[in-house]
Image (cartoon, rainbow, N blue to C red):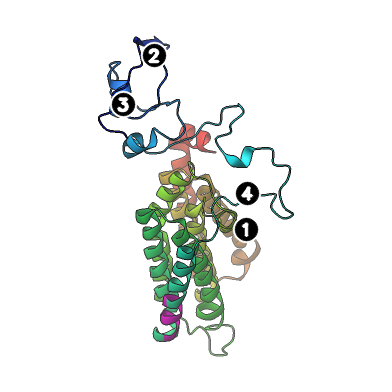
């Protein structure tokens, strides 16, 4: 910012206090660029954390090297966030500040995405609509990350809800309970749909990290755009779990849920997500309860043995992982 501008800050020193490097100057100036650090012998690019006494001017030169920008709200007469002012004359219904209202660009984006959703609904085979919509959510999530537009993430979350709803209403229940001759849905379609939604998790984690330093609109908070990694996890898990309950015969439901629960726990350990691990543990507990209440008494001999062996192996695997990484898991829980 202001490239080539000369700045006189007077005699300057670098203080080292407890491993923290502090640059102090005689005269104050705006933190216009990284050279204000370099003149004191500090290379900003090598620092893990930089604390700038500035609210706006630093952004042009420092944001390109920053993984995230965290704004500290210091007390004083001028607040960094207008929402923190003691508003006393707001109009009725304006008690909550909408950080960014609807714009014409947002409306056009919604109309455009709505047109694509409708096109897929009418042009794609009825069973494959959920998979087509899931691909659209992946494209929208990538667009939100690349273009830095939260409106695309809002649309992706809404379509995820539509994918789950249609998967339940059409692909699962309309293909099973409403027909007298059994399941007519296709296992592969729902599996592909769930895999596409899960493939958006890396993008969702990056969007979650970015949202920590951003203000979010009321609409965004309502849709949960601050935690897209939860939405893109629980949606496919719900689809797969219900599909297993309907698709599998009674002897394979417990077995399949056990495998799913073990995979979810491993995923939770890999990405250090407590909600994922608790979901996997819940699935395993449901399996144990189902064995005690139902499987041990009503399953055929072969299905009973197979279920007991595989679920026992899954529980052993989970116990081994938790035992080996006990300290890490304890910190994460």
Rounded to the nearest whole Å, what is the CA distance between mark 3 and mark 4? Answer: 35 Å
Marks 1 and 2: which is nearer the front?
Answer: 2
Q: Give the quadrant of residue 13.
A: top left
**Element marked by disc 3:** helix
Q: Is any part of residue 246 visible from this angle? A: no
**Which of the numbered marks, if any, corresponds to residue 25?**
2
Q: Disc 1 to disc 2, how far (Cα)?
A: 68 Å
Mark number displayed over residue 97: 4
Q: Which residues are magenta?
A: 116-122
Mark 3 or 4, closer to the camera: 4
Name the residue located 34 percent from the left edge and 34 percent from the top edge.
62
Q: Compared to 205, does 249 lie above or below?
A: below
Question: As drawn, is 220 to the left or to the right of 90?
Answer: left
Q: Nearer the viewer, residue 274 or 294?
A: 274
Membership of 264 in magenta stretch? no
* Tag 3 near tag 4, CB within 8 Å: no
**The C terminus is located in which quarter?**
top right
Q: Quadrant of the N terminus?
A: top left
Residue of label 1: 289
Residue 150 place in picture, x, y as percent: 46, 56
């Amino acid at each position: 910012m202001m490239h080539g501008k000369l700045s006189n800050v007077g005699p300057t020193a670098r203080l080292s206090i407890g491993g923290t490097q502090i640059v102090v100057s005689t005269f104050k100036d705006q933190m216009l660029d990284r050279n204000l650090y370099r003149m004191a012998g500090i290379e900003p690019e090598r620092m893990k954390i930089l604390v700038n006494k500035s609210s706006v001017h630093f952004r042009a030169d420092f944001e390109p090297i920053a993984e995230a920008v965290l704004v500290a709200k210091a007390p004083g007469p001028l607040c960094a966030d207008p929402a923190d002012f003691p508003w006393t004359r707001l109009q009725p219904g304006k008690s909550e500040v909408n950080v960014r209202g609807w714009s014409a660009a947002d409306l056009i984006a919604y109309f455009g995405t709505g047109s694509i959703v409708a096109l897929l609904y009418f042009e794609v085979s009825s069973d494959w609509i959920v998979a087509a919509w899931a691909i659209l959510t992946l494209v929208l999530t990538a667009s939100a990350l690349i273009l830095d537009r939260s409106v695309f993430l809002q649309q992706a979350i809404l379509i995820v809800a539509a994918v789950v709803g249609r998967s339940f209403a059409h692909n699962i229940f309309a293909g099973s309970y409403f027909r007298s001759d059994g399941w007519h849905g296709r296992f592969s379609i729902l599996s592909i749909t769930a895999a596409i939604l899960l493939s958006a998790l890396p993008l969702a984690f990056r969007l979650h990290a970015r949202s920590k330093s951003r203000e979010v609109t009321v609409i965004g908070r309502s849709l949960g755009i601050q935690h897209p990694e939860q939405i893109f996890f629980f949606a496919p898990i719900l689809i797969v779990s219900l599909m297993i309950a309907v698709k599998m015969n009674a002897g394979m439901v417990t077995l399949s849920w056990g495998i799913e629960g073990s995979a979810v726990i491993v995923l939770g350990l890999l990405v250090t997500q407590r909600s994922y691990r608790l979901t996997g543990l819940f699935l395993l507990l449901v399996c144990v309860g189902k064995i005690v209440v139902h499987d041990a008494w009503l399953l055929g001999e072969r299905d009973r043995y197979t279920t007991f062996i595989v679920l026992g192996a899954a529980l052993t695997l989970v116990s081994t992982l938790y035992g080996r990484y006990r300290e890490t898991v304890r910190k994460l829980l």
